[in-house]
Amino acid sequence: MSEARSGRVVEQLRERELTALLVTDLVDLRWLTGFSGTNGAALIGADERLFLTDFRYTEQAADQVEGFEIVRAGRDLLGELAARLPAGHAGFDDERLTVKEHARLVEKAGDSVELVPAGGLLRELREVKDAAELERIAAAAELATAAFERVVAQGLAGRTERAVALELEHQMRLAGAEDPSFPSIVAAGPHGALPHAEPRDVEIPAGVLVTIDWGARLDGYCSDCTRTLASGPVGQRERGVYELVLSAQEAALAAVEPDAACASVDGVAREIIAAAGYGDRFGHGLGHGVGLEVHEGPRLAKGAAGTLAVDSVVTVEPGVYLPGELGVRIEDLAVVAEDGPRVLTGFTKALTEV
């Protein structure tokens, strides 16, 4: 796996006429080498495979990192890596490297090395998942769905938003998750009109819509799902908004296919919601990629560049948010496939009373 990913990186280096690439972002580093520690860096080129870490992680690196020469470095990890750069054009992560770190690179690299911005190179490669990654994301989604089913089976009315969120995260950890992909959202009634609402120590009343957004991290990979439930019978207003969002979500999900323009997929849901008079109440993008990070490329949004590739994993999550009244968001996690999207999130999307 590491060799295959290294090969993809070297191909990109040739296309960009780079001699080597410095890998300093820990998520990129994990994707490339398998290392899950908190201090490491790598150098990769056509004939270079170096992995540097400090004494705390040398044994861990020996267990996790394959295909790279492991070097025990001192405190100045970046400086030691820069000093080993071969002559030529070396790419660095200009999107995440600090000004101070860049200055250190320049100081240590020497006159024979030209540092070239190459931020996003690995993140672009990470958008297309290999078979092992797809298996891990699917397993994370399955775990998260099972935990959700256990929690909502206990009902919602009378429990606080915070209690539901904590129980959901507890159940995911009990099932083997490393941690939640992100802090879980539980938002009832008017609180659901906040797309990123924080759970409160407030009891969920009966007869309101409750939006729950959650995910699990398993073996480093994330899942992401949102369902809006009812804590008892709700009115026609709530049901109407719910059915609108569901129709927009299912139409956009059907548009997730290879070579589809990311902005166009977003537009499918946006046009349906706008036609119903709620265009200004769907203010966020339709979705995003998921992998080692819960938010990564590609983006499904107005003005988003690019197209979808086979084996990318994206969320499809339109919403309608009515301040002071309610909010509805429905989200699936799907793999882009030749024969249509493969949905990884399993809980029903029919409006469910619990």
Image (cartoon, rainbow, N blue to C red):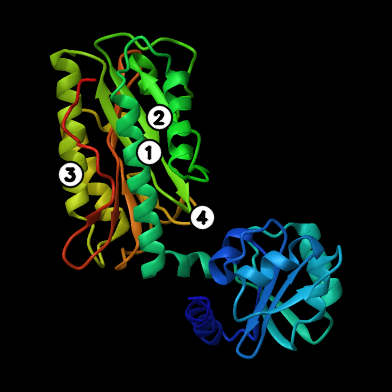
The amino acid type found where label 1 is placed reads His
Residue 250, label in figure:
3
Q: CA distance from mark 4 to mark 1?
A: 26 Å
Q: Earlier in the sequence, mark 1 or mark 3?
A: 3
**Residue 299 in view:** no
**Residue 34 in view:** yes
Instruction: Mark 4: give few (<14), some (14-19) or many (20+) Cα within 10 Å.
Output: many
Q: CA distance from mark 1 to mark 2?
A: 9 Å
* Whether label 1 touches label 2, CB < 8 Å: yes
Q: Earlier in the sequence, mark 1 or mark 2?
A: 2
Q: CA distance from mark 3 to mark 2?
A: 20 Å
- Label 3 or label 4, whichever lies nearer to me, is 4
Compared across the picture, whether 59 is left or right of 177 comes to: right
Q: Give the structural element (helix, strand or loop) at label 2.
A: loop
Q: CA distance from mark 3 to mark 4?
A: 29 Å
Q: Earlier in the sequence, mark 4 or mark 1?
A: 4
Along the viewing direction, whichever of 112 and 34 lies nearer the viewer: 34
- Label 4 or label 1, whichever lies nearer to me, is 4
Along the viewing direction, whichever of 131 and 121 lies nearer the viewer: 131
- Which residue does the numbered mark 2 point to in the structure image? 195
Instruction: Mark 3: give few (<14), some (14-19) or many (20+) Cα within 10 Å.
Output: some
Instruction: Mark 2: give few (<14), some (14-19) or many (20+) Cα within 10 Å.
Output: many
Q: Give the structural element (helix, strand or loop) at label 1.
A: loop
